[in-house]
Every structure is written in C-alpha cells, then in structure tokens.
Amino acid sequence: MLMAVKDSFDWRPTASFTNLSYRAQLFAKIREFFAERQVLEVDTPLLAHTAALDVNIDAIAAACTRAGTSNLHTAYLQTSPEFCMKRLLAAGSGPIYQLGKAFRNEEQGRYHNPEFTLLEWYRPGFDHYTLMNEMDEFLQTVILTEKSTRVTYRNLFLEYLQLDPFTATLAELKHCAEQHAVHVFAAVESLHHDDWLDILLSHTIQPKLGLHNPVFVYDYPSSQAALAKVVQKDEIAIAERFEVYFKGVELANGYHELTDASEQLRRFQNEVKLREKLGKPHLSIDERLLSAITFGLPECAGVAVGVDRLLMLKLNAASIKEVLSFTFENA
C-alpha cells in the first residue's frame, strides 16, 4: 500500500545559506590558524566503548553488534574527542587539533543541541597560561575580538558578589543566592558547595562577563579540577584550568592537563561512585586512556571550544538554530 506524501513536515534548513556560508568560512579560518602553527589535524572515533564519567555530562548510548556475534554491545557517541586525542599525544603525535562532531544528551535550547561541533586542541610543553595566550590569539584571528582580559575565579566572586568562593560556608552561599533573587527548584538539601558556586556563577556573574571583549577566568577550586593539574597557591589547592566567556556565553574550557595515571584513576573511581549515588547510568573507566597516561602523556595543555556558539557570537545570532543546517528537532 502506497503512503501519501505529506507536505506538512518542516523539511527546510534552520540556518540561512548566508549563515551556512559564514560557517564554511569559519571552518577554513580555523584550519588556516592551525596550519600556520604546524598543529596537526586529527580525526578520532565518534563511537567508543565508554564515555566521559563526569556526572554533569550525559553520553548518548548506541547498541552495536560485536564482531563475529549477534550479541548487542552498548557503545557511546563521544561527548568530546579528549580521551582518544590524549592517546595520540602519548604515542608521540606532537601538537594536534580536531574539528568535528560531539554528542551530549542534554536539554535543547538557545545554546544547546544534542549534536554539536567541537574544536579541541592540545599543546605539548604548554601550561594553561601559555594556552590562554594562544586562545586569545585564536579569538582575535578567527572572529576578530578585542584582546581579552583575565581574572582569577576567586577575584571574580570577590568583585561581583563580595564573596570568597574558597572560604565561604554553605550557608553563606545560600544566603548570597537569596540576596540576588536566585530561585533554585531542585532539592536544595542535595546541593553541595560546588553546586551553589555554579548556580551563583551562571545566574549572577556569567551574564555580565565579556560584554565587550572575551574574559578568561582561571585558577578554579581543586574540587572542580576535572582532568586538570592541582597545585597549592597561598595554602589553597588550585585547579590549573580556565574558562572563556564572551557576551555572557561560556565559550571554552581549558586545562593544564593531568599526567599522573594514579591520580587520574582515583578521580575516575570517585566519579563512578558519584554516578552510582546520583542514579546515573554506569560507565566503565577508560583503561586504554589510563594505559596511555601510564606510558607517558607529555606535559601539555588542552582546550575545547564550542564552534556553533563561536559562530553565534560572531554573527550575533539569537539561537543556535540560526547557525545549524538542521537542529535535532528536524534532523
């Protein structure tokens, strides 16, 4: 039986062809930037046997058949190319970058789409300060920003909220949120110190950041280290990482990368326990990454940049759908 053809489906692209042309130009500028610096473009798998353990990032699972069997195996669309890129670094790749798709099972909205384009690059011999310099050059070259400014995470909170994020009590953080009319609809008793810091940053500070030029926020609390090195500064443990904000939007996240396999394993194990506690799907620890770090991940720094957001900011677009050919809704 033949089905009638319907014309009611919205089949058209969400971005204009003018914006898609700008998108192609942006990709070309990105590749030119790294070619001039002799940074190798690489291409790593989108589908892998495990995924990032970060409780704030949800991977999209895919059922695959194992070779030679009919048994289904759960694999994951990658939330970032980081793990495979670090394996390349350990194998001696030298400086590398990747420009491609990443996937996260998250809400859709003005700045979010489950499938997005991510630029990630790694520089052996760099620390996070050196990488901030290059990231600043990148933004000035690719989307013609003014020179950036920098502020530590601590001074950011002191400037905007008159609050020290390293010494403030949980009660003080809650009180600060109330003073700024930040209403939290989650179970408040389940929120921890870092949760409140994230809420205060995203709701009261972030909208004011980088309105004229990009702002680099660096030296985070050690509890927010993720995959970054941790050092002692003024008797306080600091994570050597940074985030970039422009026009009130979080644009990039960079680390002075952790190269200690034992510490990496400890952090992975903690994430597994936390995922279990929060009822998140179980994910296996990436043993291949740990083996690569054990073999010898070089001292390096790396950064991930949301390319769709980068183009949005360049074009002053109101929504991510204006820079994507098709969003998830009409893919």
Image: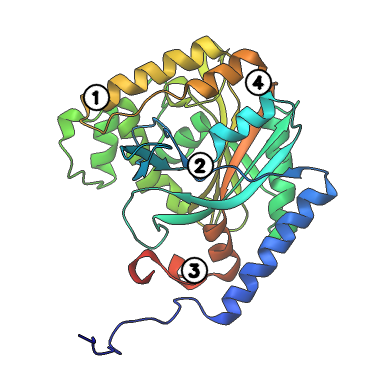
Give, as a three-letter code, the residue at label 4: Leu
Asked if one can make out residue 275 in the rendered structure from this viewpoint, the answer is yes
Residue carrying label 1: 276
The spot of residue 55 in percent (x, y) is: 33, 32
Residue furthest to the front in view is 68
Cα distance in 3D space between marks 4 and 3: 35 Å
In the picture provided, is 272 more to the left or to the right than 292?
Answer: left
Look at the numbered discs 4 and 2 and tell me whether their residues touch, using CB distance below 8 Å.
no
Residue 194's disc number:
none
Few, some or many residues within 10 Å of mark 1 (<14, 14–19, 20+): some
Question: In terms of secondary structure, where does tag 4 sit?
Answer: loop
Image: 179 above or below 108: above
Whether residues under marks 1 and 3 lie with C-beta atoms below 8 angstroms apart, the answer is no
Please state which amino acid type lies under the numbered disc 1.
Glu
Q: Which residue is mark 3?
A: 324
Going by the numbered disc 2, the residue's amino acid type is Ser
Q: CA distance from mark 4 to mark 2?
A: 18 Å
Tell me the residue at 56%/36% (across/down). Answer: 82
- Distance from disc 1 to disc 3, alpha carbons, whole Å, reads 35 Å
Residue position for label 4: 297
Rounded to the nearest whole Å, what is the CA distance between mark 1 and mark 4? 29 Å
Quadrant of the image containing the N terminus: bottom left
Measuring from the top left, give residue 25's x and y in whole percent. 69, 68
**Judging from the image, what secondary structure is the residue with disc 3 in?**
loop
Residue identifier under label 2: 80
Camera-nearest residue between 213 and 16 = 16
Q: Amino acid at mark 3?
A: Leu
What coloring was used for the rendering? rainbow
Q: Using residue 28 as the reference point, say whether residue 252 is left or right of it.
A: left
Work out whether mark 1 precedes mark 2 in sequence or the reverse, and give the earlier one: 2
Q: 62 or 202: which is nearer to us?
A: 62
